[in-house]
Image: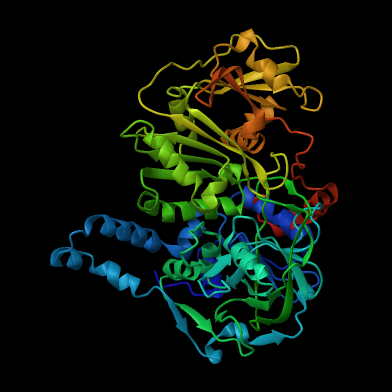
């Protein structure tokens, strides 16, 4: 397929493939667009182009990548095939021979298409219009949830360069509009742009920043990809696109501009300046609170003369970011065995917001080699924020969680195979820990041959404060209990309850029915509502050689805690507004 070099080309493809719904009725970027988007994506519906947006002259497009099919329409199989072939070449090329080089010539030809190219101002549509000073209120930024602290850029492409010239970063860090000329920048502790700002701030310098919005589909995905710090995102964008990425000089100096971007906002982030940012309904499905973050002070804004504003909506998985994350995992998965010695397969689970749960299939050729592989994962880039990591050496597809979990529970030795690391950093958006950015993580090993049969029926008894109970997976009993506020020690009590003695794992929840509605809800409830160092209980604990060994049942207390932020829900007024017009603007098959 020919390269898709801008948003318009992609929208043309979506129109031809009946994957784009144009909505001409007036809609409000404050809450209304987001709720329409959520309903359509839940139905597996098309991308949405809103042509009449209240308060703005720019149309809004959402749900660009909300199905696997649309991702294939954007990128095809070429980038996935290229990465696989490149990895195979790295594994087989040594020692190099003329025959091997000739057989791999197609990879070299594709590699020649990867990179950047300079184009003139006339060939850079992003330079067609300019605002100086910027008028950020003219952009139809979305307010997605009634609890949000204002309007946000939800598909921001934030570009910075290291103050010493050691590379660039293109990341998706949420942007909270403060006023017409300034925004918050949600640089988290583990993000490349945050590292650049740290270096600049240590020197008392402002960090130049460019905020791109829209452009080639490849640019949007490259900004999300969990790349190591030394791999440039613009190169990944070029690889995904299948051609060199066009760049143009800014007539006013500073960073070069992505020529086919819809918008480019230029400015600086001063040192030692913070303003409250948030709250914001995030991709874990909960509300993230207000915290102080750096401030982006804009100088000017460029945009295409017919610019279209792309946006997305995050919240309770599965949302659009789930499909993007899975695509990027498929793309980058062949690289993991090269970059992480001993790792054969790696999977992060979008059902849990990605950072809450990961699994790896590894080699275990000598005693505890699997543990070493797990440490490599927990020390690598964004993977270092994984909260719960499952490790196995089995011959199975670890992306199939029910099979993985059963396989591990049949093999785990609880007295030696669960490692909890307390007092470490935790994802900024995960509020299960004692304070922001602080918490714990765990690694669970399930290695070797099967050691036990797992119970599949529950015939035991429950304490009076619990019930009902349901076996959701072999060896895993989901038990409803009173609220944590009323019974904070209930997890410990369950672990010592005689009627549960035969169960390897008990998941304590607020609602059994909600937690076991389907696999998605089980994973979300389980892994987003506990902190390893605080919420794992066992009938016995033994400290031997500085390791805490456990005796089943192992109880995971996954009830909502008083300090957790609230689950995201649509407010009644927005629901009523969208209900009143939904049947008129959305075809029957997507309702």
Q: In this view, does 584 lie above or below 472?
A: below
Q: Quadrant of the N terminus?
A: bottom left
Q: In this view, does 316 lie above or below 49?
A: above
Which of 53 and 219 lies nearest the eye of the viewer?
Answer: 219
Do we see residue 588 in this rendering?
A: no
Q: How is the image coloured?
A: rainbow
Q: In the rendering, at what x and y percent does residue 185 appear? A: 70, 64
Q: In the rendering, at what x and y percent does residue 585 appear? A: 71, 59
Q: In the rendering, at what x and y percent does residue 401 appear? A: 49, 35
Do we see residue 70 in this rendering?
A: yes
Q: In the rendering, at what x and y percent does residue 280 appear? A: 75, 54
Q: Is residue 348 left or right of residue 480?
A: left
Numbered circles on residues, count: 0
Give the residue displayed 56% in from the left and 67% down from the top: 170
Give the residue displayed 60% in from the left and 86% down from the top: 250
Given the current orientation, which residue lies at the most extreme right position? Answer: 573
Give the residue displayed 43% in from the left and 27% down from the top: 407
Q: Is residue 307 above or below residue 494?
A: below
Image-quadrant location for residue 36: bottom right
Give the residue displayed 50% in from the left and 22% down from the top: 414
Q: In this view, does 245 lie to the left or right of 591?
A: left
């Amino acid at each position: 397929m020919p390269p898709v070099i801008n948003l318009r080309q992609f929208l043309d493809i979506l129109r031809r493939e009946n994957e784009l719904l144009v909505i001409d009725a007036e809609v409000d970027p404050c809450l209304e667009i987001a709720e329409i988007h959520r309903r359509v994506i839940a139905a597996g519906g098309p991308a949405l182009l809103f042509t009449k947006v209240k308060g703005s002259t720019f149309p809004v497009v959402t749900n660009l990548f909300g199905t696997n099919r649309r991702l294939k329409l954007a990128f095809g199989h070429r980038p996935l095939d290229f990465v696989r072939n490149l990895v195979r070449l790295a594994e087989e090329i040594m020692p190099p021979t003329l025959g091997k080089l000739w057989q791999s010539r197609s990879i070299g030809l594709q590699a020649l298409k990867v990179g950047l190219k300079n184009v003139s101002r006339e060939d850079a549509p992003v330079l067609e219009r300019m605002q100086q000073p910027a008028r950020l209120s003219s952009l139809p930024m979305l307010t997605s949830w009634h609890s949000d602290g204002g309007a946000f850029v939800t598909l921001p492409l934030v570009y910075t360069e290291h103050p010493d010239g050691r590379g660039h970063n293109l990341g998706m860090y949420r942007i909270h509009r403060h006023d017409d000329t300034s925004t918050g920048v949600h640089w988290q502790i583990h993000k490349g742009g945050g590292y650049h700002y740290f270096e600049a701030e240590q020197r008392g310098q402002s960090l130049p920043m460019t905020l791109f919005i829209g452009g080639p589909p490849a640019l949007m995905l490259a900004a999300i990809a969990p790349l190591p710090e030394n791999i440039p995102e613009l190169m990944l964008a070029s690889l995904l696109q299948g051609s060199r990425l066009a760049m143009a000089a800014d007539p006013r100096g500073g960073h070069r501009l992505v020529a086919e971007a819809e918008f480019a906002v230029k400015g600086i982030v001063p040192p030692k300046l913070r303003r409250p940012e948030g709250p914001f309904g995030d991709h874990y499905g909960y509300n993230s609170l207000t915290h102080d973050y750096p401030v982006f002070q804009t100088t000017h804004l460029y945009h295409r003369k017919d610019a279209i504003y792309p946006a997305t909506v995050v919240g309770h998985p599965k949302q659009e970011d789930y499909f993007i994350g899975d695509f990027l995992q498929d793309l980058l998965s062949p690289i993991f065995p090269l970059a992480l010695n001993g790792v054969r397969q790696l999977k992060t689970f979008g059902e849990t917001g990605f950072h809450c749960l990961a699994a790896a299939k590894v080699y275990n050729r000598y005693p505890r080699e699997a543990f070493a592989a797990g440490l490599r994962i927990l020390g690598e880039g964004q993977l270092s924020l994984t909260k719960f990591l499952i490790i196995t050496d089995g011959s199975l597809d670890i992306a199939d969680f029910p099979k993985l979990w059963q396989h591990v529970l049949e093999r785990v030795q609880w007295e030696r195979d669960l490692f909890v690391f307390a007092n470490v950093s935790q994802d900024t958006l995960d509020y299960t820990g004692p304070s922001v950015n602080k918490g714990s993580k765990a690694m669970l090993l399930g290695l070797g041959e099967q050691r036990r049969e797992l119970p599949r029926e529950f015939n035991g008894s429950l304490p009076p404060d619990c019930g009902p109970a349901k076996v959701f997976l072999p060896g895993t009993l989901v038990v409803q209990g009173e609220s944590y506020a009323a019974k904070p020690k209930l997890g410990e009590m369950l672990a010592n309850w005689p009627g549960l003695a035969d169960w390897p794992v008990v998941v304590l929840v607020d609602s059994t029915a909600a937690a076991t509605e389907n696999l998605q809800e089980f994973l979300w409830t389980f892994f987003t509502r506990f902190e390893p160092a605080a919420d794992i209980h066992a009938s016995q604990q033994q400290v031997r050689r500085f390791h805490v060994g456990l005796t089943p049942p192992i109880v995971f207390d996954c009830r909502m805690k008083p300090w957790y932020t609230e689950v995201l829900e649509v407010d009644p007024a927005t629901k009523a507004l969208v209900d009143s017009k939904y049947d008129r603007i959305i075809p029957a098959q997507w309702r």
